[in-house]
Image (cartoon, helix red, strand yellow):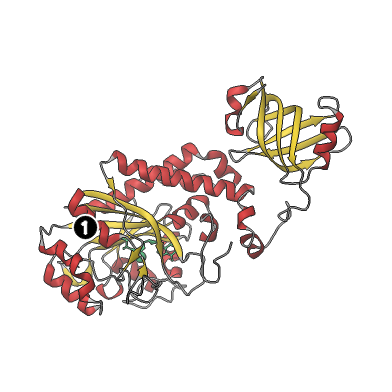
Amino acid sequence: MTTVTTIDRLGDHTGQTVTLRGWQHNRTGKGKMMFLTMRDGTGFVQCVVKKGNVDDATFEALSGAGQESSMTLTGEVKADDRAPGGFEIVASAAEVLQSVQDYPITPKEHGADFLLSRRHLWLRSKRPWAVMRIRDAVITAIRNFYDERGFVCIDSPMFTPAACEGTSNLFAVDYFGEESAYLTQSGQLYAEASAAAFGKVYCFGPTFRAEKSKTRRHLTEFWMLEPEVAFADLDEVMQLAEDMIVYVVGQVLERRKPELEALDRDLSKLTCIQGNFPRITYKEASKILLEHPDSEFVAGDDFGAPDETILSAMHDQPVLITNYPKSVKAFYMKEDPEDPSQVLCVDMIAPEGVGEIIGGSQREENMDKLQEAIDHHELPMDEFQWYLDLRRFGSVPHSGFGLGLERTVGWICGLEHVRETAPYPRMMGRIRP
Ligand code: 4AD
Ligand code: MG
């Protein structure tokens, strides 16, 4: 019996004979030599199979086994600088568990729709492998970041009776005949209650928006990380957001280099994320856009995707834009004491045209102002009584933000479309597989 190991641990076994368990990713060569790329989920490795080194029956079985055939393979681990991953296996034995023919996803180019319809298989390919492992490292980094800073993870519910982020993109559900029941758009309102109970909290889970637009930035189901901090003002959570991004990018660079390389990611775009992000106000950003020849921005409007692209292209690092007009933002944001037409809010715009990855604000802690805002937004006051309790009983200044996981992963990976950053993306017109 040889040691069973995984491809990511080959470095611990240089010169030894080990057994790998996985799938055939690719095969080339003819005659007495075969080069077989094996994958096992932890990585990809080239295995050299030579007639004579393995018995004839094994050689035949491997020669007849197509892409994604499952197998175990035993061989010597050789360090080789030219090999991707730095190691190569010289096979001495193998067993084909299932010999497969005609796997639908071949090494040739396939269209996005073809691949998305086969996402359950596409996940085995190298690109999704790299993206999903980076997503995993981002999630771990986020949780560690908050854990190290004394935050408590308190998750918000997915079923809610009211809107948090406007009423136009709600998914209604049949909740035992309740008149209003929806999938949550954001865990924020509950995170505010949790912050009053635990001080510094975050929730991290799926959120849902019935986005009727097909853009490269929108999913109908996406994950949001939402820290909420009692007694914090906007500046404090802006600094928190910046520190978190620097930390997360640093962790991905440290833990997922091979994956970034598999994606041909320009690492200089990530190593420059060091902090001191540029900060501008909505008014300053508006001025830039109004003077920009390619912008169709109308003064007083929210920024559209093309506007965010222009603003983000001006900097290597994410940009923090603050103090938007009240009219374009959510009901719970605190009025700017220096200009009541504005709110104390922030959007973080990622570089390279990615656009908004974070939206946050100081929250309105004044009971009367908040009630006015709920009325003004025509939200059902009854459903917000529990939320108003937070202003009735020990109201304090507090602030928080939401980070879109998929957009953040898309930016870090350098992807064009967020759909590649979710394991099983949900968008308008796509609910399968
Ligand atoms: O700016 P948003 O709508 O903010 C909120 O929901 C706040 N309640 C968060 C808070 O303060 N706790 O959404 C936050 C982030 C966006 O910046 C974006 O990254 C992401 O969520 N996001 C989406 N990602 C993918 N698809 C969509 N349809 C998204 N909508 C928002
Ligand atoms: Mg937003």
Residue under label 1, please give it.
193
In the foreground, 240 or 271: 240
Relative to residue 114, is residue 404 drawn left or right?
left
In the foreground, 247 or 210: 210
Q: Is residue 65 above or below residue 282?
A: above
Residue at left offset 19%, top offset 56%:
398
Q: Quadrant of the N terminus?
A: top right
Residue 113 image point, x, y percent: 64, 65
In the foreground, 95 or 291: 95
Residue at left offset 87%, top offset 32%:
32
In the picture as drawn, the residue positioned furthest to the front comes out as 176
Q: Is residue 376 above or below residue 276?
A: below
Task: Name the kind of residue labelled 1 in the image.
Answer: Ala
Residue 59 image point, x, y percent: 83, 33
Picture quarter containing residue 295?
bottom left
Q: Residues within 10 Å of mark 1 (few under 14, many from 20)?
A: many
The reply to whether residue 232 is visible in this rendering is no
For label 1, the SS is helix
The reply to whether residue 133 is visible in this rendering is yes
In the foreground, 344 or 218: 218
Residue 38 image point, x, y percent: 69, 38
